[in-house]
Image (tube, grey):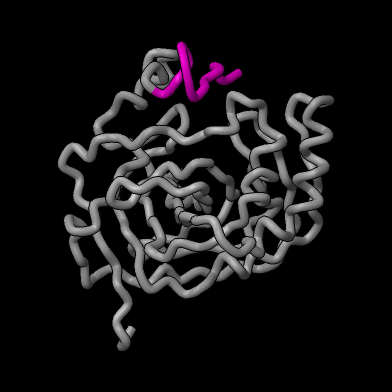
Amino acid sequence: HAVHFGYSGSVGPQKWGSLSPSYAACDGKSQSPVNIVQKQAVLNKNLKPLTRSYAPVNATLRNHGTAIDVKYETSPGWVTVWGKKYLLAQMHWHSPSEHTIDGQSYPLELHLVHKASDGNITVIGILYKYGDSDPIVEKLEKGLKKLAKEGKKHEEPQIPLGVIDTKQLKRNTRKYYRYAGSLTTPPCSEIVTWNLLGKVRTVSKRQVELLKAPLKREFQKNARPTQPLNGRKIELFKKTDDQ
């Protein structure tokens, strides 16, 4: 069973690396999240648009203690990064955001976790500011309310969602930041190619509360602080009209 970790105190982020030998990577040199300084991001003309194709599939909404996630029975589709195919496995939320842009934090961040056959991971991160409601969370509203009720009864409550269409996740990406990093929770494995979308989307305050409600109080703020870049470069993809 995985060792308990948290977001404050003796099991907080500063201590993760020493909670268990299997969490040693949390003290590594290529950790996530990071602060993205826009001026220092390097435009890379070889980066390709994040071409994604997702189909409607069966999914389950889960409260796995440290975050709320949507797990897919079969992968709804994939994204191609540097010619390698990564299948969408799950998506989950962090509040406040984990990545920051020029030091600014946001109320919410969504992680679309994709896995390649060799075990490597690519994550598409989407930042949200307060504003109009988000269509994805809207679809999950009933499930989230159920999850908040169930939470008291079960260890890891799950709500079947039936078939969920993920096409809202697929909007065109005109700009993203890419860097080499890690999982943002233990074991913090440094196997992740990060793609943080440049366009900040909107979510309502009420929706952020809905996403927090099923979680125990200690996990209602579940963002790891930003980690040093240690010389890593952040690349920028910007869509030009001929792409």
The residue sitting at 50% across, 63% down in the picture is 201
Q: Nearer the viewer, residue 94 or 209?
A: 209
Position of residue 92 in the picture relative to residue 58 (left or right) = left
Position of residue 62 in the picture relative to residue 16 (left or right) = right
The residue sitting at 30% across, 46% down in the picture is 103
Main SS, magenta residues: loop
Q: Residue 191: x percent and y percent?
A: 37, 41
Q: Residue 173: x percent and y percent?
A: 42, 71
Q: Which residues lie in the magenta part?
A: 1-13
Q: Residue 24: x percent and y percent?
A: 36, 20
Q: Quadrant of the N terminus?
A: top right
Q: Nearer the viewer, residue 115 or 179?
A: 179
Q: Is residue 17 above or below residue 177?
A: above
Q: Does the magenta-highlighted stretch encompass residue 7?
A: yes
Position of residue 58 in the picture relative to residue 38 (left or right) = right
Determine the image quadrant of residue 214.
Answer: top right
The residue sitting at 70% across, 37% down in the picture is 213
Single out the residue that lies furthest toward the bottom.
242
Q: Does the magenta-highlighted stretch encompass residue 105?
A: no
Q: Is residue 185 above or below residue 166?
A: above
Determine the image quadrant of residue 124.
Answer: bottom left
| Count of marks, rendered view | 0
Q: Quadrant of the C terminus?
A: bottom left
The residue sitting at 83% across, 42% down in the picture is 146
Q: Residue 30: x percent and y percent?
A: 27, 37
